[in-house]
Amino acid sequence: MLKRLVNRQCISLHRSYSTAPKPTLQLVAELRKLTETSISKAREALSATNNDVSAALSWLQNDLAESGAKKAAKVQGRVAKEGLIGVCILSGGTGHSSGLGGIRAAMVELNCETDFVGRNELFGKLVSDIAHTAAYISEPVDSEKLFAPCPLDILNDSPLLPSDASRHDPSQSSISTAIRDTIAKVGENISLRRAITFIKDPFPPSSPYGLRVANYVHGAVSADLSQGRMSSLVAVGLKSTNLGALLQSKDFRTDLGVLERSVARQIVGMGAQTIRSDSSNESTSDALYAQPFMMYPQSPEGASVEDVLRIWGREHGLEGGEEPCVEIVDFVRWQVGEHIEPS
């Protein structure tokens, strides 16, 4: 008798399950387009919500939050030394078409456990979005240093501002939430290791001074050249009584851009650590100005970086008197996973 009742109950459950409409391929594709979730998870969400896409989105958000929190707790102690460095320049400084002459830039390092995840598209987008957020929300600091560390606790709690506005996801209320959700998707520990910003207001239009930012990224793993395994941010100073007029010339701006990028590339490729050599240190191989300018296409044979900057300024009509017309004011060079000296 008991066996007969159990069989009837199973038949009843089977009938009620079989009458529920299966998610169509169109609905699955629509949901995946909105969320980038897997096919199986999209089907599960639609089945659980009677094929209601809006309800399925909420179901996925709740599921991702729950699974993400569990996975984040599970992988928290794992070592994460791989990853990417991302750069975002919203405003490049004096004479740049981006912005109004001020500088607004950021560089971040996001770590994961393996190179495989470091090449993942989701991870790359997260790096870009965090760098964009840091550049967007930061304000000028009252300090002699141009590059300012961005406090990670503040950055993690900040709303994630995607570099591509079409990818805005209201469910990701903060950077820490976005990191948690990505952990749930890739199954590895992910951590934001460091971030710096370069934020400066513009000089007055009549000023003989200018300040610009340049960068170079090496070891890109995708078509996005703003992220890779090594990167530099460079503050380039200009001085000339006719600077405003020179910057009106497209050819001048183009040549200046080539020079700046070559300096940034030199810093990454030749391992510069300081701008000038310390008189107490006989070795000059780490001093940028003393290095042969290998990365500049028009560099005279054997000419140092300092020599080329001086020659370039003279040949391009900058009038700065006795002071240098083109000068590297400061720079930062990062490599993924490198040792960081305590500050």
Image (cartoon, helix red, strand yellow):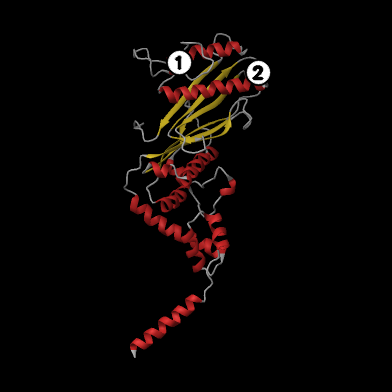
Looking at the rendered structure, the kind of residue marked 2 is Leu
Residue in view at x 56 percent, y 49 percent: 167
Residue in view at x 50 percent, y 44 percent: 125
- Packing grade of label 2 (10 A; few <14, some 14-19, many >=20) is some
Residue designated by label 2:
246
Q: Label for residue 158?
A: none
Which of the image's four quarters has the N terminus?
A: bottom left
Q: Do the residues labelled 2 and 1 touch (CB within 8 Å)?
A: no
Q: Where is residue 234 in the image (x, y as percent from the top left)?
A: 50, 25
Q: Where is 23 relative to 301, above or below?
A: below
Residue in view at x 42 percent, y 42 percent: 118
Q: Say which element carries label 2.
A: helix
Residue lying at the far bottom of the rendered structure: 1
Measured Cα–Cα span from mark 2 to mark 1: 25 Å
Q: Where is residue 292 in the image (x, y as percent from the top left)?
A: 45, 14
Q: Label for residue 289?
A: 1
Would you say residue 29 is visible in this rendering?
A: yes
Q: Which of disc 1 and disc 2 is earlier in sequence?
A: 2
Nearest the viewer among 294 and 256 is 294
Left or right of 97 on screen, residue 67? left
Q: Position of residue 56 (x, y in %)?
A: 52, 63
Residue 287 image-quadrant placement: top left
Residue lying at the far front of the rendered structure: 25
